[in-house]
Image (cartoon, rainbow, N blue to C red):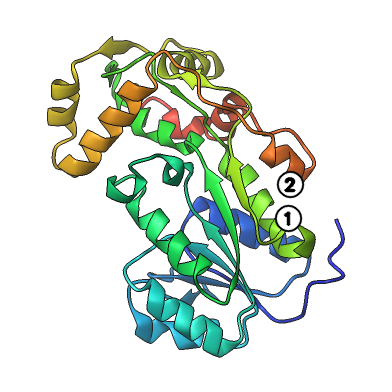
Amino acid sequence: MSNSTVTNSPILVTGGRGAVARGLSGLLTAHDLPHRLASREPDSPGTVHCDLTDPATFPGALAGVRSVFLYAEAAAIDAFIKEAVTAGVEHVILLSSSSVLAPDAADSPLSASHLAVEEALLASPLRTTLLRPGSFASNARGWAWSLKSGRPVHLPYPGSHCDPVHEADIAEAAFAVLTNPALAGRAYTLTGPHSLTFTTQLAILGGVLGRPVPMEAVSPEQWKSEVDGYIPAAYADALLAYWAANDGLPVEITDAVENLTGHPARSFETWVEDHAAEFAATA
């Protein structure tokens, strides 16, 4: 991959506390590409303050920037676009979601914010590239507490399929688009290499950890009551509807990760191997 077309202007990477942003920052550093890691709550030296809900933080973060890796926060997107245009930004890579492709995307808590940001960017003068991951492999972290405590994982739809994608693949896809203008200005649906049920994911998790992962099927109502206080009711309802729609139905897998990065998408097993320590049993 050639970086000959990349300018010396810093690249703004928002969402600096997120795994994708950190991964992208690491790639840019490794290739000696100037960039500015930004976060709503800067927690490391050199990270700048950029709260995507607070327009007052935009001018400083965007000064001198020509490319932006942007998280999909809709609250102040119009103000962000206005400031980006004023600053001379030419290209925005949005971390969106494949959920925007659903017919009810505008009304779903899973996708409404992503869709609103997409629409605002596409209506702007900014060249926009859309990265639309499906299910993050890191969603499996939601099972860590059960595994650490020795309790079964409760699933309302054990046979529901998803396409878990490794955050490292998303970061590499973003890097490819940032450093090769020929790839910019398009929409990419990023998936893992396999459509997996929750039951299969738990079996893979247990295989890597070397111990069984107990699972218990529960009703949607029970699951919703158990996550009350952790997941907003509307979001929980949307998740349940999504899982029900994919119960027993494999989801479509794309080759976008391989086309962008030059290697096949990492497997869910690889993700578990990379994060096994997070599931270690408590002493």
Along the polypeptide, which appears first: circle 1 or circle 2?
1
Q: Is residue 9 above or below residue 220?
A: below
Vertical side of 69 occupied by 130: above or below = above
Q: Measuring 42% from the left and 42% from the top, which residue is drawn there?
A: 99
Amino acid type, mark 1: Ala
Q: Which mark is residue 176?
A: 1
* Frontmost residue, 174 versus 126: 126
Q: Position of residue 231 (x, y in %)?
A: 22, 42
| Helix, strand or loop status at disc 2 | helix
Where 140 sits versus 26, above or below?
Answer: above
Between 217 and 206, which is closer to the camera in this rendering? Answer: 217
Taking the spot 43% from the left edge, 10% from the top edge, the residue there is 212
Label 1, secondary structure: give it.
helix
Indicate the quadrant containing the C terminus: top left, top right, bottom left or bottom right: top left
Image coords of residue 28 (percent x, y): 70, 64
Q: Where residue 37 sits: x, y (%)?
A: 55, 70
For residue 146, what is the image quadrant?
top left
Q: Looking at the picture, how far across and down is residue 215, in whole percent?
A: 32, 12
Label annotation for residue 100: none
- Quarter of the image where the N terminus is located: bottom right
In this rendering, does residue 231 appear at all? no
| Residue topped by disc 2 | 260
Q: Residue at x 42, y 63 (%)?
A: 117
Q: Residues within 10 Å of mark 1 (few under 14, many from 20)?
A: many
**Image check: 225 left or right of 34?**
left
The reply to whether discs 1 and 2 touch (Cβ–Cβ < 8 Å) is: yes
Is there any visible trace of residue 102 in the rendered image?
yes
The type of residue carrying mark 2 is Leu
